Amino acid sequence: MNYITDRTYAKELLEHAYQQNPGPWYKHSLNVAKAAENIMLELKIRGFNLDCDIAYNAGLLHDIGRYKGFTKSVIHSYDGYVYLDELGFKGNAIICVTHSFPCENNHIENSAEWEYVPPFMKEKLVQVLKENAKYDIYNKVITLCDALADENGFTTLEKRLISVGLRHGTNSYTAIRWKGFYKIKKEIESLIDMSIYSLLPGVEKTIYTNIEY
């Protein structure tokens, strides 16, 4: 599985994408990368054989599909997958998809607003999810960090999920997605034997800020 390990190259890709579609997703991506790196460093301390550069760059590029502009539902995941897959980085391409589906291969039909996604895109996204039904640690960490960082820095999972819900709405399957994030959080915390928030400097300040919506 090919991943981008060169941070300079990954940052160049992110900068190019941002120039095509400026927005808060850029700073969000920077913060996801920092959170992912912090978690990976702790996992390495605990004896896991992991690559912090892979995690950092995957965090930078998980939303790169937004270079095409505003798209509904998980279309940006498809765009990111195609973009990075064509560059030869299948591992990063897959993370563009999996980060939008915290429940792994479960509840695929209930994990996105598929009515906004063209059939050919849905077919490809479902194929990628089924072929990667068991997320590895990189996919899990980026998926979690996507929900622990916004454009302002690190935040709590609860605050981030509510903010997204207020901005994009909720449905009868929202709780299933939220449980997916908490399942990953619990698993990673069991590996590092501490709260994930211990690795996110300044996260405690978010309790004093308003929820963005």
Image (spheres, rainbow, N blue to C red):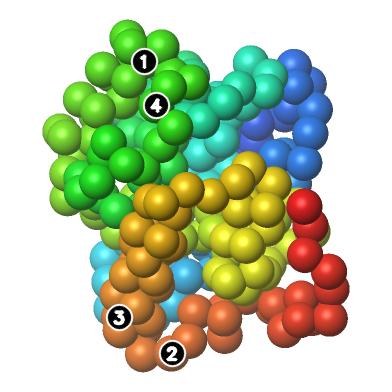
Q: Which mark is residue 194?
A: 2
- Mark 4: which amino acid? Trp
Q: Which mark is residue 114?
A: 4
The span from disc 3 to disc 1 (Cα, nearest Å) is 35 Å
How far from the left and from the top, in percent, is residue 14? 65, 31
How far from the left and from the top, in percent, is residue 109? 27, 36
The span from disc 4 to disc 2 (Cα, nearest Å) is 37 Å
Earlier residue among tags 3 and 1: 1
Earlier residue among tags 1 and 4: 4
Q: Is residue 155 above or below residue 13?
A: below
Earlier residue among tags 4 and 2: 4
Q: Is residue 78 in view from this perspective?
A: no
Secondary element at image label 3? helix
Q: Left or right: 95 with respect to 8?
A: left
- Mark 1: which amino acid? Met
The span from disc 3 to disc 4 (Cα, nearest Å) is 34 Å
> Depth-wise, is mark 2 or mark 1 nearer the camera?
1
Residue bearing mark 1: 121
Q: Residue furthest right?
A: 209
Residue bearing mark 3: 191
Q: Are marks 3 and 1 in contact (CB under 8 Å)?
A: no
